[in-house]
Amino acid sequence: MKLNLQINGQPQVVEAALGERLMDVLRRLGYLGVKSGGCKKGECGACIVLMDGKPVNSCMFLAVQAVGHALTTIEGLGSAANQGWKQTEGLSPLQRAFIENGSIQCGYCTSAMILAAKALLERNPDPSEEEVRTALSGILCRCTAYVKPVEAVLQAAAEMRSAKQPGTGGHLPETPKLIPVDDLPSTQVVGKSAIKVDAAKLAQGKAAFTADFVQLGTLVARVLRSPVAHARIVAINTEKAKALPGVAAVLTWKDLPRVAYSTAGQSDPIPGPLDSFSLDNKVRFIGDRVAFVAAESAEIAEEALNLIEVEYEELPAVLDARDAIRPGAPVIHDEEDYVNFADSDPSVNLAAKIRIDIGNVEKGFAEADRIFEREYVTSKVQQAHIEPHVAFSYWDPDDRLVIVTSTQVPFHVRRMVAPLVKLPVKRIRVIKPRIGGGFGNKQEVLIEDVVAHLTIATGKPVVYEMSREEEFIASRSRHPMRVKMRTGVKLDGTITANEMIILSDTGAYGSHALTVTGNTGQKSMALYVGDGEYRKAPNIRFYADIVYTNRPPSGAYRGYGVPQGYWPVDRHMETIARELGLDPLAFRLKNALRAGEFQPFSTSWNEGREPRPEVVHTVGLEECVREGRAAIGWDEKFGNPAWHEVPGKPHLRRGIGAALVMQGTAIPYLDMGGASLKLNDDGSFNLLVGATDLGTGSDTILAQMAAEVLGVKEDDIIVYSSDTDFTPFDKGAYASSTTYISGTAVIKAAQQVAEKIKTRASAMFAESGKPVPVEQIVLAEGKVHGPAGQSFSLAEIALNSLHHTDQEQIMAVASHVSPSSPPPFAAQFATVLVDLQTGQVTVEDLVMAVDAGVIINPRTASGQIEGGMAQALGYGVCEEMVYDERGRAREKDLVDYHIFRADEMPRMQTIFIETYEKSHPFGAKAVAEIPMNGVAPAVGNAVLDACGADILDNPITPEKAWRARKIKV
Amino acid sequence: MNTEDTRYIRPKNLQELEALLKQKYGRCRILAGGAFSPARVEADEILIDLQDAGLNQVVLENDTIRIGAAASLQQILEGLHAIAEIREPLEIEAGLNVRESLSLLNYLRTAETRSPFLTALLALTPEVELIPSGRKLALEAFLGQENTDSREIPIYVNFQYPKGFAWESIARAPKDRPIICVTVGRNKSGRLRVACGGNEAFPRIIETEARAEGLFTSVRKAYEHSADAWASEEYRQEMSQILLSRCLRKLGLIAEYQEEK
Ligand code: FES
Ligand code: FES
């Protein structure tokens, strides 16, 4: 049927099916700012448009219902000001504010936020913060904690009220508090809050994400998933599905080569068992793959799934990690072609095993005055990135398979998919457009083989986007763990021995089983080495069994095992301090790792490889505690009964808590990043990196570092990331490594290019009769300068090298592997309000003081801390994935799985305590993962402080707090 | 309205709508604003869109609040601003844009037992008005109907303007779905109606006239066998007493019922 729609003030006659959703029609028409969060039922808000000025979810309407209404999409707001000879009004104040203040991380929610804000400001030009939060309340953002988007709306409102001229900008909000290192060499670009290189396109809703590049006519894939937790597929009949008009292919395990692999996107060799198959004749969890379908439309593909007849022989299921290791437990991986790694033993459901003893642990316990022993439990939580997993593939004219995918690890995808589809690596090209959030879940090869198999089967382009339900039941999540802590302590608070014994549930497959759990110990147990003699020779034990169960697989999630470590470690430290009557902060600092000491685990463990002892050179922990305690008002609140009480509300009680944490920076001696850099005619540069910016701002930071070396502005660096055909190898975005590893590769490439520029400049100075030796030439302000004031612009250098004399392309390629992994440190503080009658906990304040080395871009770095704290807050109080006795998930959508909304956030503050990490050219360490570690234990400690509820398993739900509270009214 | 497809109809008023419903079409589907899952449209279906039928209003008529089936949740929030305590369950139910999108009719079609707004609404003794039958039935009876005739549609939800209304809930986070919520509506004659929700069973309703025992006991009993994946029965029963007390306190009625407690 033809519909007369009015879109962005323009009437349009649109062809649409009667039952077609408004969202699908708008995207088909090219309004790509309308995003799908995979839910298509009003949960995420990514698909917002304005209908008659009101924000509505376009997935909730049929297109025909929009006839007669004025629709506004993000494309109806401003566009970039510089359009060559064409004059435009430029970006709207809202778009500019979002760009300037760092509101855009992955950018997947940005169009929706800007539109919702526009609707608000048209109604109410002078909104309060609360009104802004209400306006944004139906748009879930997993990256920003809403801090900067709310600021951006207020900033734009102020600018619009004062009717400033476009381009003059409102006031830029203050960047976070930053305590700089003394005597740092001055920098022009590094250390500044540069605007993100890709912010403008995201604020305009332009094609950026994988789904934005899918061509019309691409077949749509769907995956049939297991309804039972453990079963053999006895028979599978696809005839009816294949006969359905519009179905192009139906694939089962019988159709595909059987290749054992691991879905974990890691460097070769994969440090884990090969226990997965693209399709298998056995299913191991509810949601496991059974068959793939490609059809002309999503509706046909879904109908085809219903026509596949599967006969399951149900097997007993193991749904609790404790049952998995009991003698006689059902064996989940009984396939003969399972490939072991290290200590994995599928006959006893063991995916991995770790045994680490540092020092003499038993001696340490024997020397302790008190031994504290408790068991803690951490929950299974989901990454919940708003852009779902999405990939499409096609044959290019040279018969090479092109896979376009929202992945954190494009090079690993290419290497890992090749054997599954029986193609050599050289016949596969992987392109990674912008990623709409990943948080580790896209460090997994979960969908690329699906589209590749279907393209091979049909010869046609195929797209697959996971639904939100599939994200919950069939992607990856954080490994839940049972953690036994045993700590020996002298009465003066000296830790003499510390032991952690873990039972970790990897679910049905062992991706990241060994390395996530290894990290749990390595990054949390390393923090407390003891004091005095014990500091010189710490006694630490870390044992872990990582077992298979018939629950959905666990995997990589921001923090990579470390949040599971700090819940028990820091809750334990709090208990010990209180039991011994010690100041909790002083007790922690007394035993914490200090600069110049070995990272204790580096002497004993290296993910199954040879250990390489490593000294930690920068530890800003004391300063973090000092600044954090001042910011939260610790000294006025802790131990002050008057502060804990709420006047007139005897049923409410306040509490304050802290946690100290560390993380790592990249995987030493293993993970490599590469960069290539070339000079263009106008003095700009193309920077090609394999690193993947999943919203962290890493493309911007890499540009800043290159710009600093080359003496140009960051917008003279055109960053492209990533395409396995064009960009150098990079292991991808994980392990907090991009700034440190990929960044150093960029700096090395830039240094080589700078040398070539100086060499040419020297020749050009000589030619002009004013010779200057190379070593006296300085790059600054887009020019090369000699000591006597002589200079050439980089454009002159470029023209000379490309067109005039001894022509050459000035360029360089460099790569970097680090011999060290310098840990960032942080002090996390929280205040809570506990309802003593109901156990309801409201988190009021979160303050995090972080030592992440020199901060390359304070605004993007603070965005990382804020967003990380928000995710960690969910882990602390409301996020968990629960399964019933048959293995069915309770959480299958973003309603039951609650992630924090804009209108319920606590106050947040970030403080950076800079240290200069000498192993990085600009002194940087990692920042993206550490905010995941401290919030849950700090909140747990604050709840204990408020009401005596000592809760050992997270999240802290009202019922748990109610049961555990010691103060009753 | 300008589409070529004769299977899509927007009646201009209630009379047109009624006439359409009485016609002998094949299957018909009622559209009313946004829905969580705009259902697939079958080839032989007629789509009747209520957006022009005058049903997207919240009005007060002679002490009766009439909410049109096509009114959005946000219109309801704004229209009921005088009943301050209804704001919170609506805000918990959904963020602003979903409230702008979702109509009352579609909300009722998909409302889950744990829905906070459903519990809130039930305390107001709502009645559903249907056409073309002209039937009126209690909301709980309407939602409990096994088979609904697609030709009989609700056009209004009506209730008396309450003398008092109080809402209390407990959740893991301020805007999370409650684990338990208790709502008390008080009508003009002073009768109380308590809706007990937040678990996987349909909210229980207790009316002060009908109860054979004390209100607190009745509310506690409403949470018998309420254990589910979100909370235990014991917790819910204990909390029901706290939340009821708080609601009664807000309504200035705690002293009246204190003794029972
Ligand atoms: S796609 Fe519309 S709300 Fe998620
Ligand atoms: S920036 Fe909001 S979801 Fe990523």
Image (tube, rainbow, N blue to C red):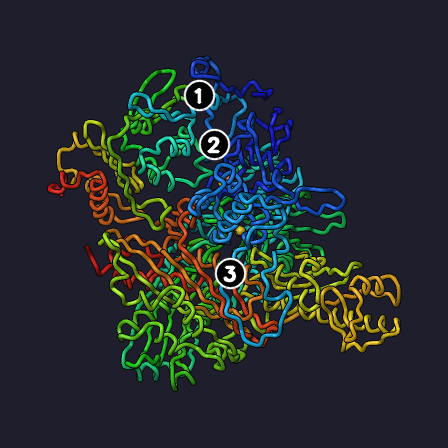
Report the residue marked by disc 1: B54
Residue A474: percent from left, percent from top: 48, 50
Number of on-image labels: 3
Mark 3 vs 2: CB contact within 8 A: no
Number of the front mark, 2 or 1: 1
Q: Dividing the picture into quarters, in which one does residue A969 lie?
A: bottom left
* Residue sitting at the far bottom: A533
Q: What kind of element bears circle 1?
A: loop
Crowd tier of the residue under label 1, counting other residues whose Cα lies within 10 Å: few below 14, some 14–19, many 20 or above? some
Q: Earlier in the sequence, mark 2 or mark 1?
A: 2
How far separated are the C-alphas under marks 3 and 2?
A: 37 Å
How far separated are the C-alphas under marks 1 and 3?
A: 50 Å
Is residue A435 something that shows in the picture? yes
The amino acid type of the residue labelled 3 equals: Ser
Residue A424: percent from left, percent from top: 69, 58
Report the residue marked by disc 2: B34
- Residue under the point 44% across and 51% down: A285
Q: What kind of element bears circle 3?
A: helix
Q: Is residue A92 above or below residue B82?
A: below
In depth, the one of A19 and B208 nearer the eye is B208
Report the residue marked by disc 3: A862
- Residue under the point 19% across and 30% down: B191
The amino acid type of the residue labelled 1 equals: Gly
Residue A805: percent from left, percent from top: 88, 66
Number of the front mark, 3 or 2: 3
**Which chain is home to disc 1?**
B
Is residue A109 something that shows in the picture? no
